[in-house]
Image (cartoon, rainbow, N blue to C red):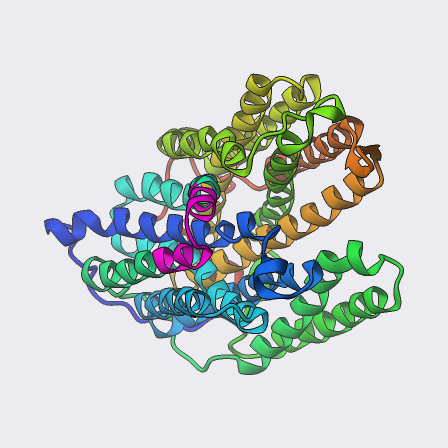
Amino acid sequence: MASPAPISAPPARTGGLRGRLTVPVLAYCGTLMAVMQTVVVPLLPDLPRLTGSTAATVSWMVTAQLLSAAVLTPVLGRAGDMYGKRRVLLASFALMTAGSVTCALTSDIGVLIAARTLQGAAASVVPLSISILRDELPPERRGSAVAMMSSTVGIGAALGLPAAAVVVQYSNWHVMFWLTAALGASGVALIRWAVPESPVREPGRFDVTGALGLAAGLICLLLAVSQGGQWGWTSARILGLVLAAVVVLATWAGQQLRAAQPLVDLRLVSRPRVGLSHLAALFTGFAFYANTLATAQLVQAPKASGYGLGLSIVETGLCLLPSGLCMLLLAPLSARISAARGPRVTLALGAAVIAAGYAVRIADSRDLVMVIAGATVVATGTSLAYSALPSLILKAVPAGQTASANGVNVLMRTIGQAASSAVVAAVLVHHTSPVRGLPVPTLHGYLLAFGVAGAVALVACAVALTIPGDARPGEPRGKRSATPAVAQDAMEGA
């Protein structure tokens, strides 16, 4: 069944001070969202003592935010398509800010975990912002703006770790959350001032049943993936969660195919350009995340291990800083490659560069300069790949489903990152040796993790090359309809 025609209005003005600041404001919000995801990392070793809880309980400050982000990103993306992207963007950023204020006011671990769950709503900032950029910007500005928006995920992650480490080291840990609350409040104010409400809407009734089914299935799946190493991969709890995820998501898929206005249009996802783009996002997310996880642990390993550098958490963050700066500088290059060769070529190139970066890591992970160089090459590939993924989605879906489709794409990246975390942890746990009486991962374990991530990057490259090109059969290259996704939707059916 074809999707109802979106409600549209004359495009908002892109001139004037507010119009010129729309892209920087959205990029600032995307960067702050990524910072919010990483600021808790330097706190994790000390939080059991600060909150009077256990390390396993404290880890839920990360797990809860991950689950919330995975569940809410496609849901809020769909809500943005239906009720207004700026409105939902403001709500998600306000929830993130409220979470920071709550964290700043308490040391109770239960309240802290609940507050981090609220902050997961901010993960929808990127797909909502990309959808706004599609609706508001002229084509000649759209590519570079979308590329910049996509790169904010890596930029914020690289900036957040050293900044948070400095605050934690030299101040009370609550100060960090007060700072992020102030930054979040500034983001809300800037969105209200500089970001127009998108004129494109998808009319209809929100699929509450589909949202609840997707939430239940994803929670079971991601809990199994994220907690498998701690609970045991063959434990009854993990096997039960996997079985529940399969049953719930299969039931949910049937409900979505029957629904007149589904939360996720699975018929649209089944098209090669959309489905393969989501699959490439899954593998790219896996490959990217292994770099951050392994690098942070490797450089902090004690020198007695024979390879570790014994760096502090602040010094570790500084090692990752060049990666963030590289992603910032390469966003315009990604847009130019996509404009000249198509986003699928940019995606394939990015995945190949990620694999090359892991080859550098395998060649030498003892020297600090080579560690930074390898991590930066991986970040370079990630910038190219992450910038190309939204462009592929924009070209393949109707305007009225941009936010929800990009939300699903971000969800696939999140699942890939969760799987990467589980695999890297499992590899390192199974390759340890005693150092001063404590088990420390061996260099072989790290190299094996890099090899797995590089292989997955090559799979992402292969998937990217199978995505159909931009030109339709019989259509000259470069000739495109003004609204290709809508035309394709009309010809192929929803």
Residue 53 image point, x, y percent:
65, 65
Given residues 165 and 147, the one toward you in this image is: 165
Residue drawn 55% across the image and 62% down it: 65
Residue 322 image point, x, y percent:
45, 28
Given residues 155 and 476, the one toward you in this image is: 155
Q: Looking at the picture, does residue 274 appear above or below residue 115? A: above
362 is within the stretch colored magenta: no
Given residues 419 and 387, the one toward you in this image is: 419
Magenta span main SS: helix
Residue 296 image point, x, y percent:
60, 36
170 is within the stretch colored magenta: yes
Residue 488 vs residue 217: left or right? left
Report the magenta residues as a range: 163-180
Residue drawn 47% across the image and 35% down it: 383
Residue 475 image point, x, y percent:
44, 39
Is residue 127 something one can see in this rendering?
yes
Q: Residue furthest left?
A: 16
Location of the N terminus by quadrant is: bottom right
